[in-house]
Structures are given as C-alpha cells and as structure tokens.
Image (spheres, rainbow, N blue to C red):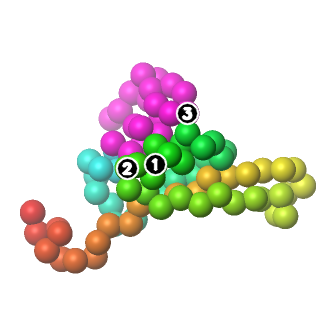
Amino acid sequence: MYDIRAVRGTIPLTMFTIELVEKLRPRVALYENVYRKELRQVLEKAGWVCQRFDMSFIIPQKRIRLICAKIRSMNLLDYAR
C-alpha cells in the first residue's frame, strides 16, 4: 500500500491522487475538496474537468467546494492493452 504520511499537504495529496488514478485507470474518478485556484489548475492540467460549487444553500456556512471528475473513454480498444 501507499505511505500517505510522505505526501502531507493539499497540493502533494492532490498530485498523489492524480498519479494513483493514472496508475489504476478507472473509467470514472471523482475529486472533492475546499476550493483553491491552485488545486483546480493542477487538476485541469492533468485532464480533469472541474467545477466550483457554493454549498451554502445546503449548509448554513459559506462553503465553496471544488468537485472534479476524470472520465476515460469507453472505447473498448482503449482497454485492449
């Protein structure tokens, strides 16, 4: 398994997540965190689709969240490797 203690901090953990998703290659991967522009840039550079959500209409505190998805092609030839 992976040693999470070696990758402390939001940006390093996000990079770890990106690397893990690239290694495991799931068809769909989701990412959620507190909104930070730097996180969005890192994820979008890696091919993730990101959107900013204001959750204050659901909970009584101002909560801006970053929700991203990495969706791979469903083409069977992509999985023939």
**Res 4 → quadrant:** top left
Q: Give the number of the mark in front: 1 or 3.
A: 1
Mark 2 crowd level (few <14, some 14–19, many ≥20, 10 Å Cα): some
Q: Nearer the viewer, mark 2 or mark 3?
A: 2
> What kind of residue is marked 3?
Thr
| Label 3: how many Cα within 10 Å (few below 14, some 14–19, many 20+) | some
Q: Secondary structure at mark 1?
A: helix
- Residue 44 x %, y %: 45, 52
Quadrant (top left/top right/bottom left/bottom right) for the C terminus: bottom left
Q: Is residue 32 magenta?
A: no
Q: Is residue 9 above or below residue 73?
A: above
Residue 6 vs residue 55, the one in the foreground: 55
Which residue is identified by label 2?
Answer: 46
> For numbered disc 3, what is the local secondary structure?
helix
Q: CA distance from mark 1 to mark 3?
A: 12 Å
Label whose residue precedes the other's in the sequence (2 or 3)? 3
- Magenta region, residue range: 1-19
Answer yes or no: do the residues labelled 2 and 3 have beta carbons within 8 Å? Answer: no
Residue drawn at the location 65% of the way across and 47% of the way down: 35
Q: CA distance from mark 2 to mark 1?
A: 5 Å
Q: Residue at x 33, y 42 (%)?
A: 19
Check disc 3 and report the residue beneath it. 10
- Do the CB atoms of the residues marked 2 and 1 lie less than 8 Å apart? yes
Q: Amino acid at mark 2?
A: Ala
Q: Amino acid at mark 1?
A: Leu
Horizontal side of residue 12 vs 47, given as left or right? right
Q: Which residue is mark 1?
A: 43
